[in-house]
Image (spheres, rainbow, N blue to C red):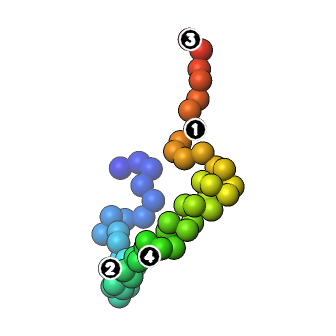
Amino acid sequence: MAGSHGSLTKAGKVRNQTPKVEARTKKGLTPILRNKKNYVKRIEREIPVGQPEFQRER
C-alpha cells in the first residue's frame, strides 16, 4: 500500500488513552440580559437585524 504514514494498528492510540472529560453545560443569557443586549444593538446602535441582503445582477 503506497503512501501510508504509519501502521493502521497504531491508529487512535493516544485518543483511546486519554481520560474522558464530560462536557460543560452551556447556559444562555437570562431573558432580561438578552433583551437589554438586543435593545442596545438594535435601537441605540441601530444595527439592522438579520443577515445582510446582497443584490446581485444576472
Instruction: Look at label 4 and name its amino acid.
Output: Thr
Q: Earlier in the sequence, mark 1 or mark 4?
A: 4
Q: Earlier in the sequence, mark 1 or mark 3?
A: 1
Q: From the viewer's perspective, is the residue at label 2 or at label 4 nearer?
A: 4
Q: Alpha carbon of mark 3 to alpha carbon of mark 2: how far?
A: 53 Å
- Closer-to-camera residue (28/40): 40
Residue 52: numbered disc: 1
Residue 58: numbered disc: 3
Q: From the viewer's perspective, is the residue at label 1 or at label 4 nearer?
A: 4
Q: Alpha carbon of mark 1 to alpha carbon of mark 3: how far?
A: 19 Å
Q: Earlier in the sequence, mark 1 or mark 2?
A: 2
Instruction: Look at label 1 and name its amino acid.
Output: Pro
Measuring from the top left, give residue 34's x and y in whole percent.
Answer: 49, 68
Compared to residue 6, the image places residue 14 above or below, namely below
Q: Kindly give the residue lying farthest to the bottom in the view shown.
A: 19
As helix, strand or loop, the secondary structure at mark 4 comes to loop
As helix, strand or loop, the secondary structure at mark 1 comes to loop
Residue 46 visible from this viewpoint: yes
Q: Quadrant of residue 4?
A: bottom left
Q: Earlier in the sequence, mark 3 or mark 2?
A: 2
Q: Mark 3 packing: few (<14 Cα in 10 Å), some, or many (20+)?
A: few
Q: Alpha carbon of mark 4 to alpha carbon of mark 3: how far?
A: 45 Å
Assign the C terminus to one quadrant of the image. top right
Measuring from the top left, give residue 7's x and y in whole percent.
Answer: 37, 65
